[in-house]
Amino acid sequence: MRAIASRANWGGDMAPELLIALVTFCFVSSVTPGPNNMMLLSSGATFGFRRTVPHMIGISAGCVVMVLLLGFGLAGIIGRFPWLYRALHILSAAYLLYLAWRIATSVGVGGRSASARPLTPLDAAAFQWVNPKAWAMCLGATTSFARPEHLTGDVILIATVLALVGFPAITLWAGGGTVVRHLLDRPRALRTFNLVMAALLVASLVPGLIELAEMA
């Protein structure tokens, strides 16, 4: 980890204890349940690990881009215009409901349904902008670990650590889906599993909706 920070003077020689805290933050934020991981679990079970890899790449790339943009000024714009944050929540809720419907109606392990397909890298990357947990994770990382005197290096370091630590973390969820895949060969079992995943995805909306109601 120290070598990562020292290359190209990224992180302005960030103290080892701060770097360890950053790695821990990125891992815990990435591995805990949330919309991305519920979708990966369902995708791994429905389409298999190999077909879910582009979805994972999109998540990682989307979060990296979000960290860079937030670190280099977007957070200040949102602070000046609070209505943008409220609009984000409304858009997030609508899109998450759409994705929950998509998960609930996915049928056929291994893609037996002609219309079913996993998310593409672009789909997954774009989803991060309406994913409340991704916003909280990326905004929290940039505000907690980017030092004003080393802003450029720290933001690049945060994005790098998030990619290196976050990708293996989300892989666990896609892999978990493939572990239970053999249990879902029957259409009814797969349908039940996807309905549960869709319900959990909808449940992830509740904290954001409560916050939005309090802001109104």
Image (cartoon, grey):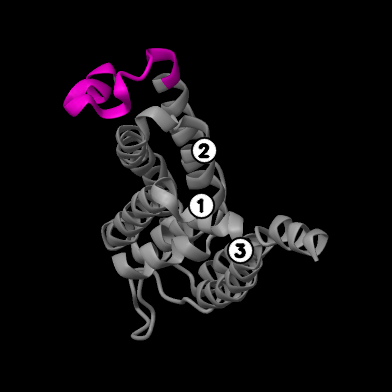
Could you say where residue 129 lies in the image, as x and y percent from the top left? 47, 63
Q: From the image, which quarter does the C terminus lie in?
A: bottom right
- Mark 3 crowdedness (10 Å alpha carbons): few <14, some 14-19, many ≥20: few
Query: Foreground residue, 137 or 155?
Result: 155
| Residue type highlighted by circle 3 | Phe
Question: In the rendered structure, are the residues bearing label 1 and label 3 in contact, judged by CB atoms less than 8 Å apart?
Answer: no
Q: From the image, which quarter does the N terminus lie in?
A: top left
Q: Regarding mark 3 in the picture, which secondary structure is present there?
A: loop
Asked if the stretch drawn in magenta spans residue 9, the answer is yes
Q: Which mark is residue 75?
A: 1
Question: In the rendered structure, are the residues bearing label 1 and label 2 in contact, judged by CB atoms less than 8 Å apart?
Answer: yes
Q: Regarding mark 1 in the picture, which secondary structure is present there?
A: helix
Label 1 and label 2: CA atoms lie apart by 9 Å
Could you say where residue 200 lies in the image, as x and y percent from the top left? 64, 60
- Mark 1 crowdedness (10 Å alpha carbons): few <14, some 14-19, many ≥20: some
Residue 204 is at least partly visible in this image: yes
Q: Residue at x 62, y 71 (%)?
A: 87
Mark positioned earlier in the residue sequence (1 or 3): 1
Q: Main secondary structure of the magenta part?
A: helix
Q: Which residue is mark 3?
A: 81
Q: How many marks?
A: 3
Label 1 and label 3: CA atoms lie apart by 10 Å
Write the start and end of the magenta stretch as one range.
2-18
Q: Which mark is residue 143?
A: 2
Could you say where residue 119 lies in the image, as x and y percent from the top left? 36, 69
Could you say where residue 161 lies in the image, as x and y percent from the top left? 34, 34
Q: Regarding mark 2 in the picture, which secondary structure is present there?
A: helix
